[in-house]
Image (spheres, rainbow, N blue to C red):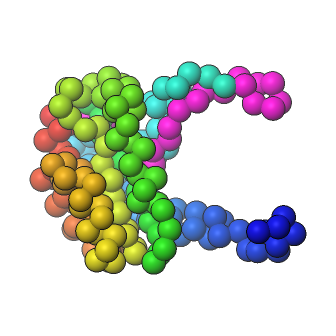
Amino acid sequence: MAREHLEGRKPWQDLAGSRGAVAEDVFSVIMEAHLENTGFSTVHKPKDLAGIYGRRTGKDGRSRLHGIHPEYAIKNTTTGKSIYVEIKRQRAAGNAHERACKYMMPGILASARKIARQKADVVPFWWVFTNGLAKDRYYRQEIAHWFQRIEGHCLFWPKLRERQVVIEHFEKHIRPLLE
């Protein structure tokens, strides 16, 4: 597609980003309320993994951390253990679920485990799939296939108003990893 055609299109990323932010905000409200006074904390946009690749120099000549930026971290303030939360939302088409797979790269897993104070056999991520990813049968099949043997790290959350789904999943699958 030519540049002039691309410039005339509405930036879908802006709309997708604002819709994704709603899911992140709802998740945050649920988890913060659930974890209040429990010895656990949530960190929005944690910087823990921001420099796992090192540093890079931008066009402006300034050096910046180069790494990954999950939406949340849930931390046990007693043990120091963390789990990083990645929330993926999209409608009927897209590749958000594919982008979730980058967190399964061996180097990212090793760095995240070390920083999150997790054992070598623990996946230090929790993926929350919403909207079309959680409703569409084909996306669910694909994601379930990719995340075999770590199903407890994936939550399909089709309706944001169903808050109990998040809490029950956390209590059953994620909280034990933080103790």
- Number of dots carrying numbers: 0
Left or right relative to 171: residue 13: right
Quarter of the picture holding the C terminus: top left
Q: Is residue 103 left or right of residue 52?
A: left
Which residue corresponds to the image point at 52% horizontal and 26% vertical from the top-left?
Answer: 53
Residue 32, image x, y percentages: 34, 52
Q: Which residues are magenta?
A: 57-76
Quarter of the figure with residue 11: bottom right
Residue 118 in view of the camera = yes
Q: Is residue 128 above or below residue 108?
A: below
Q: Quadrant of the N terminus?
A: bottom right
Q: Is residue 155 visible?
A: no
Task: Give yes or no for residue 75 being in the magenta stretch.
Answer: yes
In the rendered structure, the answer to whether residue 100 lies left or right of residue 3 reads: left
Left or right, residue 1 beside residue 74: right
Q: Between 22 and 129, which is closer to the camera in this rendering?
A: 129
Residue 98 drawn at (x, y percent): 43, 56
Name which quarter of the figure residue 154 lies in.
bottom left
Q: Residue at x 29, y 37 (%)?
A: 124
Most extreme residue toward the front, as rendered? 1
Q: Is residue 65 magenta?
A: yes
Provide residue 115's location: percent of width, then percent of height: 36, 25
Residue nearer the viewer, 53 or 87: 53
**Residue 149 drawn above or below residue 177:** below
Closer to the camera, 2 or 107? 2
Measuring 66% from the left and 25% from the top, which residue is drawn there?
56
Place residue 133 in its image quadrant. Answer: bottom left
Picture residue at 46% right of the left edge, 31% below the top: 49
Percent across and percent down for residue 166 are: 25, 62
